[in-house]
Amino acid sequence: MELVRAAELPFLSLSTLFARSFEGYFVPVPDAPQAFDARVRSEHISLMESRVARVAGESAGLVLVARRGRVSRVAGMGIVPSHRGQGLGGAMLRPLLEEARARGDARMVLEVIEQNTAAVKLYERLGFRKTRRLVGFTGTPTPEPGGLEEVDLSECARLLPDGLPWQLDAATVRGLSLPARAFRCGPAFAVVADVSAPALALRSLVVESSSRGQGAGRRLLRALAAAHPGKMVAASAIIPEGLCERFFLGAGFAQSPLTQFEMVLDF
């Protein structure tokens, strides 16, 4: 096996390889170059630091590495089906951990689906420790028109607290662009990935601190439902457990069956 910089491959080939590497996974990844490009930009993925694994000249998998300050993140690691079960996961990731350590990073973080026990065990063998469980929710709020207006993404990002997972962090929200859009209903703000999609995928939801606990967030969900009738609202499993259960369950949402672990390796 050899590792080559992801930047050496054509971008469209990387998008296709990313999709192939997650075939049959818990959450399928489509070959969608625009979505892949949005992920790279908003999550600060470095294609110079990311690697593609080649076996006998064939692309067998990849590791996407994101960087912010002195923290790196495994933003995605997958292996194409024909090369799974051959120990490539550890072989791909170990050199990248050494590179992060050598350049002076403080830590490497990642998220892994909790039900993917083989991957969880691999990361633990490599020294990662679980820091928190991440959960998601789905529901169809009762439509209630009123007060919904589109705002700049920065309006939502500025209210987000420190310490959120990478995909919820203010830096990620600020890095989003169309088709992601931000909306406001009074003191509540939400970012939706793509309002034209079959479901409204929430990328962020926050209420001004002085108005929390007064129903503003649920009014925003109902206003979104009224503006996009018949669509389910979904928040993927990137929300820290214990942060929003009362809010979403009280709004009639159900917790998603898949959960994730956030894991950290300190250098």
Image (cartoon, helix red, strand yellow):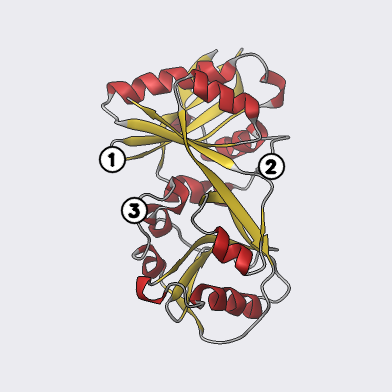
What residue did someone put label 1 on? 69
Element class at badge 2: loop
Crowding at mark 3 (Cα within 10 Å: few <14, some 14-19, many 20+): few
Give residue 179's position: percent from left, percent from top: 54, 63
Going from the N terminus, do you reach mark 1 or mark 3 first?
1
Residue plotted at (53% across, 38% down)? 261
x, y percentage for residue 216? 49, 77
Q: Secondary structure at mark 3?
A: loop
Name the spot of residue 138 as percent of width and height, x first.
Answer: 66, 60
Tag 1: Cα neighbours inside 10 Å, few (<14), some, or many (≥20)?
Answer: few
Identity of the residue drawn at 61% across and 33% down: 17
Q: Tell me the residue that label 2 is attached to.
A: 28
The crowding category of the residue bearing disc 2, from other C-alpha atoms within 10 Å (few below 14, some 14 to 19, many at least 20), is few
Determine which residue is flagged by label 3.
162
The amino acid pointed to by label 3 is Asp
Q: Quadrant of residue 234?
A: bottom right
What quarter of the picture does the C terminus occupy? top left
Q: Looking at the image, is 71 positioned above or below residue 177? A: above
Q: Label 1, secondary structure: give it.
A: loop
